[in-house]
Image (tube, rainbow, N blue to C red):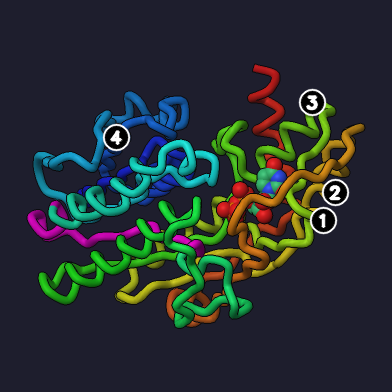
Amino acid sequence: MIRSLVTGGAGFLGSHLCDRLLAEGHEVVCLDNLSTGDVANIAHLMGNPHFSFINYDVTNYLFVDGTIDFIFHFASPASPIDYLKLPIQTLKVGSLGTHKALGLAKAKGARFFIASTSEVYGDPLIHPQPESYWGNVNPVGPRGVYDESKRFSEAMTMAYHRYHGVETRIIRIFNTYGERMRINDGRAIPAFMSQALRNEDLTVFGDGSQTRSVCYVSDLIDGVYRLMMSDYQLPMNIGNPEEVTILELAKEIIQLTGSRSKIIFQDLPQDDPKVRQPDITKAQTIIGWGPKVNRHDGLLKTLKYFKSKLNA
Ligand code: UDP
């Protein structure tokens, strides 16, 4: 049986990845220190003989018994309010954690996959963003702890590939949404949905003209799996290229919920990217990937999840 390790496996993306790997017939070892992850995301897997969970901080020396074929390093705070609250942990998991996970991959002869981010492009001066763009990141701004730790992760991953011959994959994940996001993780979609469901004002930052391109979680996970199984070593963007302004997104969510909420405008956080849209030519041509779930359907599924959470 193929054995996969997922760091951050109790998080939003990590837990969906555990589900997918189990469905593909892998044995899955999930590591998470639950700093932003939640055992509720993997509760349905407990008792599955092919699944095990270890509560562990991957910035510490990493040892896992037995063979490992694939390592997916997904552990990291990932929402702006989380990495503002946990700046040092964010830097540590991207640097020390990536180093430990790569060391384990080398020791086990495993293939290594790093969850990087569109944040490596910072506030981009090229639009949409192809993988060849080196980015526009403020290293000392509030988002620098996340952006730079992910940029370091990519550099470390390529170093292990070039120097130690470890097989590596690098994904740059653009904004993703869906079930198991935390209601209070501060990101736009959970914030707007929980506000709309409670008939509270939706908090749009700035004038809402900044754009994002949001990808539904099942599409993202399919991109992760395809990239891992491919032989492509350089960074690859995965995200839905359909771009929307944040104001438009807020209006869509009010409409979907039928809420009485109004929109209020608050200060734009420092270094908030003005635009973001993936160029997915590589994903389309190299791994045959493209998004399948449109925003309307994805938002409806997500809304159902947040409704059940708020009523629980
Ligand atoms: N945003 C907003 N209101 C909120 C939360 C976020 O207007 O309550 C904006 C935020 O300033 C950014 C966009 O929505 O421009 C996406 O923010 P998110 O935190 O989801 O992710 P980011 O892409 O900035 O990492």
Q: Earlier in the sequence, mark 4 or mark 3?
A: 4
Q: Which residues are magenta?
A: 104-119
Q: Which residue is mark 1?
A: 248
Q: Amino acid at mark 3?
A: Arg
Residue 287 lies, in percent from the top left, at 44, 74
Q: Amino acid at mark 4?
A: Phe
Which residue is found at the position 39% from the left and 73% from the top?
A: 235
Is residue 301 visible in the rendered image? The answer is: no
Which residue is found at the position 43% from the left and 38% from the top?
A: 11
Q: Earlier in the sequence, mark 4 or mark 2?
A: 4
In the image, which disc is placed on residue 198? Answer: 3
Q: Earlier in the sequence, mark 3 or mark 2?
A: 3
Q: Amino acid at mark 2?
A: Lys
Q: Give residue 140's quadrant in the image.
A: bottom left
Residue 91 lies, in percent from the top left, at 33, 49
Spatial CA span between label 4 and label 2? 41 Å
Q: Give residue 6's quadrant in the image.
A: top left
- Confirm or deny contact between disc 2 and disc 1 (CB under 8 A): yes
Q: Nearer the viewer, residue 145 or 299?
A: 145
Spatial CA span between label 1 and label 3? 19 Å
